[in-house]
Amino acid sequence: MAFRFIHTADIHLDSPLRSLALRNPELAELIGSATRQAFSRVIDLCIDERVDALLIAGDLYDGDQTSMKTARFLAGELGRLAKAGIGAFIIRGNHDALSRISRELVLPDLVKLFGGRPEHVLIDRGPGEKPVAIHGLSFAQPTAPESLLPKYRQAIPDAINIGIMHTSLGGAEGHDAYAPCSPAELQATGFHYWALGHIHKRSVTTRPDSTGAIVMPGMPQGRDINEDGAKSVTLVSIAEDGAVNLEERHTSLAEFARVSINAEGLTEWSDLAGAMTTALKQARDQSASPELVVRLAISGATPLAWRMRRDSDLLLTEAEERAAQTGAVWIEKLDIDCTPPKAAATSSSDPLHELRALMDSAILGSDGYGTALAGLAETLQAQLPADLRDLFGTDEAATRSRLSRLAREGADDVLARLQAASGSGSEPS
């Protein structure tokens, strides 16, 4: 009989929310509880599928948390799993190594939490069935610059060998290097399955004969727009002959999505509202999660450009109403990147267009303006909490790009308000 288990990682229970909580309390409540609800869905899936085990490849927590409410929730969910006779095998990741409560939590007997030294658990099965060896090694410290692979024990002969590791593999954008190793090195161990964690995007590497797999399952619930798309876990079945079968199972309660609208040529506010309705319905139809959280981006050359920016609060309300009508859709943010039609932008009779050209040529691109803007940003960053200081970017190039975009948006806002004050704009209908 095949050995069946659920593989997940990077749950980040009770991750703190940032700006989302300031804009929409209802949406903040939804996302704030989503990691818990997704984890409960994982436990439900284990029980419904009657799997043999749950494997968690690190980062149950999000860092240096002190709330025992999180610990009690986790213990309760793992207790449900144990009551169903299903064992759980867990390693600590880099975020878990920072967490105080991970060391204080009392877990059910059927839960194996691997320590900072390499271990393996040998599971004896029925007559004629190969035993299963589950190998694991937790992060003892929040960093692991060297590969952990040499510390793992060699494959146990005549057994199904499964390794659990928290690793960045060869590296991924947005993720620091942790316990680096390559898929080729993992395959060379002869393990039937490597249950990985750390990178939040799902990836799968399999042998041509399907007798081995290396899986990064992604995360069961995204937490912001940079973790967009439906999230999932992996249902794994390993047969006696070593054949590995994989099934992706969606678990996310709320799915983030970027939705774009091309406003090119739209001249009426009602046309724009209709375009939003169409785009949101299409996104809802393509979503695989119960709730959809959208960042709506509107671009293109349109006579509505300055009016949209001037009345961005009204446009956001319009988008939220259209989302509510669609059902189970939320607007996380509205990005406006529209410009007036080219003919209007080059007109010499309107002083606002002359001012825009002056801003573009003499101010926004000047070295002096860039230096002053960078200085203001550095002053602001110094006053922010440590976990918010990367809002302008994580490196010099990203910060420069972000500040340039903010300056451009600010200039457009000023022009839109000047246009309204001059009486050349009209209210949306």
Image (cartoon, grey):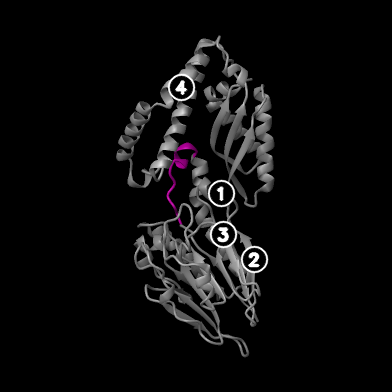
Q: Residue at x 40, y 39 (%)?
A: 399
Q: Quadrant of the C terminus?
A: top right
Mark 4 neighbour class, 10 Å CA radius: few under 14, some 14 to 19, many 20 or more: few
**Does label 3 or label 1 sit earlier along the sequence?**
3
**Does label 2 or label 1 sit earlier along the sequence?**
1
Residue occupied by mark 3: 202
Does the magenta segment cover residue 381? Answer: no
> Rounded to the nearest whole Å, what is the CA distance between mark 2 and mark 1?
20 Å
Choose between 411 and 343: the one closer to the eye.
Answer: 343
- Amino acid bearing label 1: Asp
Residue occupied by mark 4: 361
Q: Position of residue 193 (x, y in %)?
A: 56, 73
Residue occupied by mark 1: 228
> Rounded to the nearest whole Å, what is the CA distance between mark 3 and mark 1?
12 Å
- Check disc 4 and report its element: helix, strand or loop: helix
Residue occupied by mark 2: 247
Looking at the rendered image, the disc whose residue lies closer to the viewer, 1 or 4, is: 4
- Check disc 2 and report its element: helix, strand or loop: strand
- Check disc 3 and report its element: helix, strand or loop: loop
Q: Residue at x 36, y 43 (%)?
A: 389
**Does label 3 or label 2 sit earlier along the sequence?**
3
Whether residues under marks 1 and 4 lie with C-beta atoms below 8 angstroms apart, the answer is: no
**Does label 4 or label 2 sit earlier along the sequence?**
2
The overriding secondary structure of the stretch rendered in magenta is loop
Mark 1 neighbour class, 10 Å CA radius: few under 14, some 14 to 19, many 20 or more: some
Whether residues under marks 3 and 1 lie with C-beta atoms below 8 angstroms apart, the answer is: no
Whether residues under marks 4 and 2 lie with C-beta atoms below 8 angstroms apart, the answer is: no
Q: Position of residue 19 (x, y in %)?
A: 44, 40
